[in-house]
């Protein structure tokens, strides 16, 4: 019975470590996606050119998605470097 409890405790610890590695990825994705979107929103309020406004509306979310993935990967790499 004691060996079974030890195995369960090790499995719980492994799951907890996996969950902690996702936190920096989420932080990076939120900041990396939010900051460019805020910047594009501020720029679009001052534009009168319909073509530029359309490009910002179409390409803005794509840019934010790409930057959020890139910053998530960057935060994960930094977190794993500091962990080791």
Image: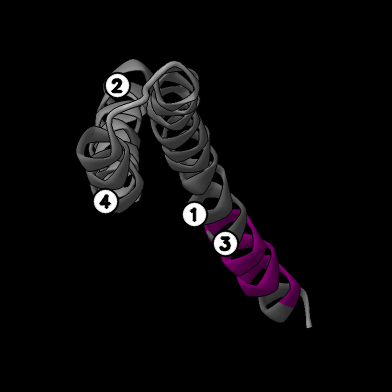
The residue shown at (56%, 43%) is: 20
Is 28 above or below relative to 21? above
* Of the two numbered discs 4 and 1 in the rendering, the one whose residue sits closer to the viewer: 4
The residue shown at (78%, 83%) is: 1
In the image: residue 28, left or right of residue 74 = right
According to the image, label 3 marks what residue? 15
According to the image, label 4 marks what residue? 62
Circle nearer the N terminus (3, 4): 3
Is 19 above or below relative to 37? below
Circle nearer the N terminus (2, 4): 4
According to the image, label 2 marks what residue? 78
* Of the two numbered discs 3 and 4 in the rendering, the one whose residue sits closer to the viewer: 4
Between marks 2 and 1, how big is the CA–CA gap?
16 Å
Between marks 4 and 1, how big is the CA–CA gap?
29 Å
Is 35 above or below relative to 20? above
Circle nearer the N terminus (2, 1): 1
| Residue 8 x %, y % | 68, 73
Range drawn in magenta: 5-14
Image quadrant for the C terminus?
A: top left
Circle nearer the N terminus (2, 3): 3
Circles 1 and 3, Cβ within 8 Å, touching? The answer is yes
The residue shown at (44%, 32%) is: 37
Between marks 2 and 4, how big is the CA–CA gap?
24 Å
According to the image, label 1 marks what residue? 18
Task: Give the quadrant of residue 3.
Answer: bottom right
């Amino acid at each position: 019975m004691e060996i079974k409890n030890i195995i369960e405790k090790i499995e719980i610890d492994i799951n907890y470590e996996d969950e902690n590695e996702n936190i920096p990825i989420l932080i990076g994705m939120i900041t990396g996606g939010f900051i460019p979107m805020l910047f594009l929103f501020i720029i679009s309020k001052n534009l009168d050119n319909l073509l530029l406004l359309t490009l910002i509306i179409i390409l803005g979310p794509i840019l934010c998605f790409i930057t959020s993935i890139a910053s998530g990967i960057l935060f994960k790499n930094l977190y794993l470097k500091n962990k080791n």
